[in-house]
Amino acid sequence: MVSAIIVANTTHSVSKSQVPRVVEALKLSRVLNCVALVPEHEQAWQQAFSPYQTKLIKVADPATTRAISAGIAACDQKDLHGVIIVPLDAAATTQGVVAAALHQFWTSHQPVVVAQMTDGSRITIISNRLFEEIHRAGEAAMLSEILLTHSSDTRSVRFDQA
């Protein structure tokens, strides 16, 4: 199973309006367990996610490794093979992109799959093989730093059309 960590890294209302589209793309791709990392100072996220049975984790900075670690810990751990990290501002995230990225994850057996869209947005799937490293990372560490150390073990996929 792959669970989703939705990163709400902005307080702009445009991101809140993306919630239904992103959650629906994940659910249609059979990613049924979703956790959302939301800024701790922003209260409106509760309302945005409430219809979708998504666990909310309030964090100081949703983009840090510490926040991702909290998201992983909040996921149902039974048969958890990885997490798909989806920033709400990844406008090109559709069911087709999510499904194609998941296909690459299952068939490539790489610990990291990065789906890059032509608009610059991306989603990342991380195998459970890296969870311990993420949990051990420093408080201010960024996920990109860990992913850089695994660049030779990363499957990158470019999508021209979402």
Image (cartoon, rainbow, N blue to C red):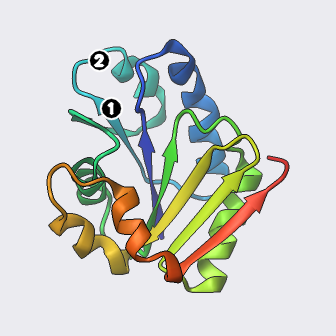
In contact (CB < 8 Å): disc 2 and disc 1: yes
Could you tell me residue 37's position as x and y percent? 33, 39
Q: Amino acid at mark 1?
A: Val
Q: Which residue is mark 1?
A: 38
Image mark for residue 42: 2
**SS assignment at label 2:** loop
19 or 121: nearer the eye?
121
Measured along the vertical axis of the image, is residue 116 above or below residue 79? above
Could you tell me residue 108's position as x and y percent? 63, 84
Q: In this image, 136 relative to 114: left or right?
A: left
Point out the residue furthest to the right here. 161
Residue at the spot 26% in from the left edge and 53% down from the top edge: 74
Residue at the spot 38% in from the left edge and 74% down from the top edge: 149
Question: Cα distance, mark 2 to mark 1?
Answer: 8 Å
Residue at the spot 59% in from the left edge and 63% down from the top edge: 114
In this rendering, the count of numbered labels is 2
Q: Amino acid at mark 2?
A: Glu
